[in-house]
Image (cartoon, rainbow, N blue to C red):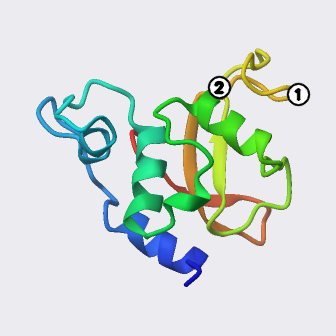
Amino acid sequence: MAITANQLITTAKKLEGYRATAYSCTPNNWFYGYNVGGDVAWCAATICYWFNQAGASNLIPVKSANCGVLARGFYDKGQLVKSGYKAGDVVFFHWSNDWSSSVPGVYTLDHVGLIISANSDGTYTTIEGNT
């Protein structure tokens, strides 16, 4: 059975408003297999966690807690796009104009989230872990 974008988004929203603490971070605990606390960035681990929880871990090209490695996995599979985003797509953010050493032709990837909706004004609504 194929997973739909709505099923993935519903799974992600179950953690909406979640705050990691020094003692607990569910996505990182799942990712690493032990309690790493809340001091470790967990946006990429969260994406992998959501896909796993939705029964769609096969759609993630590589299980990684690193945005660049995750993006490189999508790039290597020909699944990294730079436009035409839609609900259910994984989206990468960059905070600087430094070029990525992981993925050719893109800026350094600093953060990752999931698109909830593509809005009529050209903006996107996202849900993310770690921010």
| Numbered disc 1: secondary structure | loop
88 over 127 or under it: above or below: below
121 over 34 or under it: above or below: below
Q: Circle 2: is it few (<14), some (14-19), or many (20+) Cα within 10 Å?
A: few
Q: Position of residue 127 (x, y in %)?
A: 49, 56
Q: Position of residue 129 (x, y in %)?
A: 41, 46
Q: Which residue sits at x=40%, y=70%?
A: 11
Quadrant for the N terminus in the image: bottom right
**Residue found at the far left of this picture:** 23
Residue 99 location, quadrant: top right
Q: Position of residue 29 (x, y in %)?
A: 24, 40
Q: Circle 1: is it few (<14), some (14-19), or many (20+) Cα within 10 Å?
A: few
Foreground of the two, 31 or 9:
31
Going by the numbered disc 2, the residue's amino acid type is Trp
Going by the numbered disc 1, the residue's amino acid type is Gly
| Numbered disc 2: secondary structure | loop
- Return the disc, 1 or 2, that comes first in the chain's sequence: 2
* Front tag of 1 and 2: 1
Q: Is residue 21 left or right of residue 70?
A: left
Q: Which residue sits at x=66%, y=60%?
A: 89
Q: Position of residue 55 (x, y in %)?
A: 44, 70
Foreground of the two, 71 or 56:
56
**Label 2 sits on residue:** 95
Which label sits on residue 4?
none
Q: Which residue sits at x=77%, y=25%?
A: 107
97 over 63 or under it: above or below: above
Q: Is residue 127 left or right of residue 2?
A: left
Foreground of the two, 73 or 67:
73
- Distance, label 1 to label 2, CA atoms, is 16 Å
**Label 1 sits on residue:** 105
